[in-house]
Amino acid sequence: MKYINFKVLLKKLSRLIVIGLIVEYFITIWYVYKTKILFIHIPKCAGLSISKSIYGGPIGHKKLSYFKLHLVLFNPYVFTVLRDPEDRFLSALNYAHSGGTSVGHVNYNIHKLVKNNDLELIVNSVANGKIKDPIFLPQSFYLDDSNVKINYYYFNQIDQLETDLSISLIPMNASFLKKFDKNDMLPFNDRIRDLYSEDYKLINEFL
């Protein structure tokens, strides 16, 4: 009987992961070189549609600091889209509850926790770091270099974005079951405002 050498298997998997990350990085370099546009895709802010319209594919949920080389090489037009934190949290909540969509998935453990429908537990889990999925991270987390000039758009200003960049956004089928609504979130809105206070500062300052 032939035994599996898990150490060797793990080493091969690690190499594949590293290769995948390197390939992903160079794909983003090609995207920015080709378009001279750098889009910081904050989750749950209509980013997939924007990314596909500009680049033909997803640029990923990367922090601004990830693109240091891109900025030096190409001096691109940098922009992002911000969304009201309460609306974004509700969207992330419903997305996690559904397990994601055909174009993106949520960590199973987070999906399972959210499926319990215990909003108090969910909000506490985000606050104490038990839930660390990118869709629940503050928008300010992705904008971690204050020295870079960023052009900001609001979630409801997508038409202006299309005009400024001369693009037509590709509609994405991101439909998923909306388990929770704004009324469900009313008891937690103060907590959400505290959790995402830096996002409100961004929105108030730039939009």
Image (tube, grey):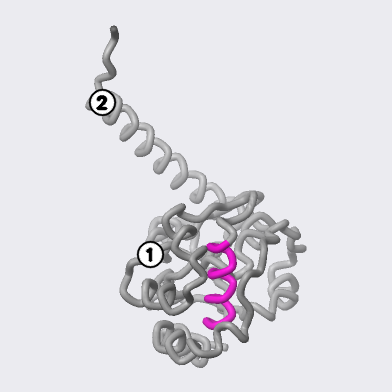
The residue pinned by badge 2 equals 6
Where residue 110 appears, x then y in whole percent?
44, 60
Furthest toward the left, the residue is 7
* Quadrant housing residue 186: bottom right
Neighbours of disc 2 within 10 Å: few (<14), some (14-19), many (20+): few
Residue at the image point whose x is 43% and y is 79% from the top:
120
92 in magenta? yes
Looking at the image, is 60 positioned above or below residue 154? above
- Amino acid at pointer 1: Lys
Residue at the image point whose x is 69% and y is 68% from the top:
165
Comes first in the chain, label 2 or label 1: 2
Which is the main secondary structure of the residues drawn in magenta? Answer: helix
> Which quadrant is home to the N terminus?
top left
Instruction: Say which element carries label 1.
Output: loop
Where residue 121 appears, x then y in whole percent?
40, 74
Where residue 51 appears, x then y in whole percent?
62, 58
In this rendered view, identify the residue nearer to me: 51 or 186.
186
- Amino acid at pointer 2: Phe
Looking at the image, is 168 positioned above or below residue 20? below
The residue pinned by badge 1 equals 132
Q: Is residue 41 left or right of residue 15?
A: right
